[in-house]
Image (cartoon, rainbow, N blue to C red):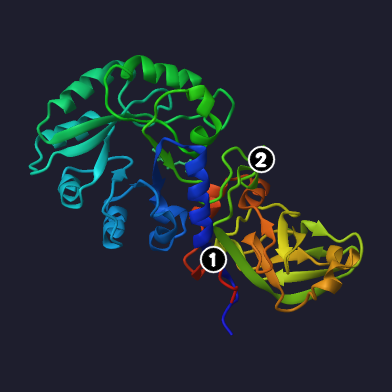
């Protein structure tokens, strides 16, 4: 028998989340962001669920190529634009839209030979101080691009640093509007958090939202609100099984560093999942986990290939009698159990001091991933 860990990508949940977001962001076109191999899900696996989007956002030309290979003919935006002038040829060949965030990218464009003019998104640094033209230089960059024969349509964009808190976009939005609103061109401002949390504050025309985490069932303002409370479903499940049982006596400890000591005799399960699979090593003792769909907790430190879970509390409540627990029991580290119970990835992330983004992207290559449709009977 092979090691029992696996990840599941839920195609129907992706479709559901996209539909849900379309109702939340009505009248705006949606770029589904599939950078980082679709946040660890795999571009080929999410394509079916997300092809109802109006376009895709990617980081690298290779990702765009994969979308074209899947048959996608619609818009694809390179979120950081090209990294060198040769990539402009790929943009021509694959008909990519690309972000322009610095002077060098404009210089490369002016020397580029293309039959069809490119559509570009000019990016303003409105306060995040990562990428983009300063507000003061924005208009002249726009004018220069607009006059460039290699360029067709020019759209304008920016990115918010604090969209996950109330009022967090106001300063940047004011900066953006005062330097870009009279330029014309389609507008793209929002990531998931901004699109879901700030719509009334924005109160302005938006042509494109760039959505990643919400499509993948991650929370935009964890831990205050869960993805579930937004009507979003988990799209990625990490599951394994119990491969050993231990009867820990009161006073004995569990795992490296003996960080958990049993106060009473405790039955524990050893799960085939560790940090080398992408489960966060910093998940503290007590992080929630599902065994046979029943909620319990991890005990002690996560090791490279294994972690321990508390079974005693399931026997306590009599739940273990209803769903027999032992060797081979199913363990859901996050996502959905085969019985349909859910554990939000954000809860696990929170216990590890990180974000659902990092857990999704951090799934290790040794974990086999299976694409499932929510409606399928689980194998
Ligand atoms: C990754 C990214 C997004 C998507 O962000 P989410 O928080 O996952 O919705 C949007 N815009 C840009 C420029 C990005 O790099």
Q: Is residue 39 above or below residue 4?
A: above
Question: Can you tell me which quadrant of the image ligand 1 is in?
Answer: top left
Neighbour class for label 1 at 10 Å: few (<14), some, many (≥20)? some
User: In the rendered view, would you say 94 is above or below 162?
Assistant: below
**Mark 2 neighbour density, 10 Å: few (under 14) some (14–19) many (20 or more):** few
Residue 56 in picture, x, y percent from top left = 35, 48
* Vertical comparison of 284 with 306: above or below: above
Mark number, residue 223: 2
Please provide percent x and percent y for residue 297.
76, 58
Residue 28 at x, y percent in the picture:
41, 36
Q: Residue at coordinates 51% horizontally, 29% vertically from top-left?
A: 199
User: Is disc 1 in contact with disc 2, using a CB cutoff of under 8 Å?
Assistant: no
147, above or below 55, in the image: above
Disc 1: residue Cβ within 8 A of ligand 1's nearest atom: no
Whether residue 82 is visible here, answered yes or no, is: no
Residue in the picture at 9% in, 36% down: 111
């Amino acid at each position: 028998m092979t090691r029992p860990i696996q990840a599941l990508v839920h195609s129907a949940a992706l479709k559901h989340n996209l539909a849900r977001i379309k109702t939340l962001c009505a009248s705006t076109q949606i770029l589904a962001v599939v950078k980082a191999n679709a946040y660890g899900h795999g571009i080929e696996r999410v394509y079916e669920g997300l092809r109802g989007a109006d376009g895709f956002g990617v980081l690298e030309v290779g990702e765009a190529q994969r979308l074209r290979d899947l048959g996608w003919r619609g818009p694809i935006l390179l979120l950081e634009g090209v990294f060198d002038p040769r990539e402009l040829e790929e943009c021509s060949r694959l008909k990519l839209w690309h972000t322009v965030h610095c002077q060098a990218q404009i210089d490369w464009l002016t020397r580029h030979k293309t039959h069809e003019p490119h559509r570009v998104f000019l990016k303003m640094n409105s306060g995040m101080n990562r990428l983009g033209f300063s507000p003061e230089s924005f208009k002249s960059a726009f004018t220069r691009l607009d006059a460039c024969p290699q360029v067709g349509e020019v759209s304008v964009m920016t990115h918010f640093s604090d969209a996950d808190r109330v009022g967090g976009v106001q300063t940047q939005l004011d900066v953006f509007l005062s330097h870009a609103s009279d330029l014309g061109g389609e507008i793209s401002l929002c990531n998931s958090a901004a699109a879901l949390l700030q719509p009334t504050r924005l109160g302005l025309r938006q042509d494109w939202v760039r959505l990643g985490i919400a499509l993948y069932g991650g929370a935009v303002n964890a831990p205050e609100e869960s993805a579930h409370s937004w009507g979003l479903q988990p799209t990625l499940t990490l599951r394994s099984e119990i491969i050993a049982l231990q009867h820990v006596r009161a006073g004995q400890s569990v795992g490296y560093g003996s960080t958990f000591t049993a106060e009473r005799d405790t039955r524990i399960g050893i799960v085939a999942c560790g940090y080398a699979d992408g489960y966060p090593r910093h998940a503290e003792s007590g992080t929630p986990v599902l065994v046979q769909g029943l909620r319990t907790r991890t005990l002690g430190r996560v090791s490279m290939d294994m972690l321990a879970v508390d079974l005693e509390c399931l026997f306590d409540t009599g739940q273990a009698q209803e769903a027999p627990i032992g060797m081979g029991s199913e363990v859901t580290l996050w996502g959905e159990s085969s019985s349909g119970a859910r554990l939000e990835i954000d809860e696990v992330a929170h216990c590890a001091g990180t974000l659902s983004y990092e857990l999704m992207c951090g799934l290790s290559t040794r974990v086999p991933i299976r694409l499932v449709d929510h409606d399928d009977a689980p194998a």
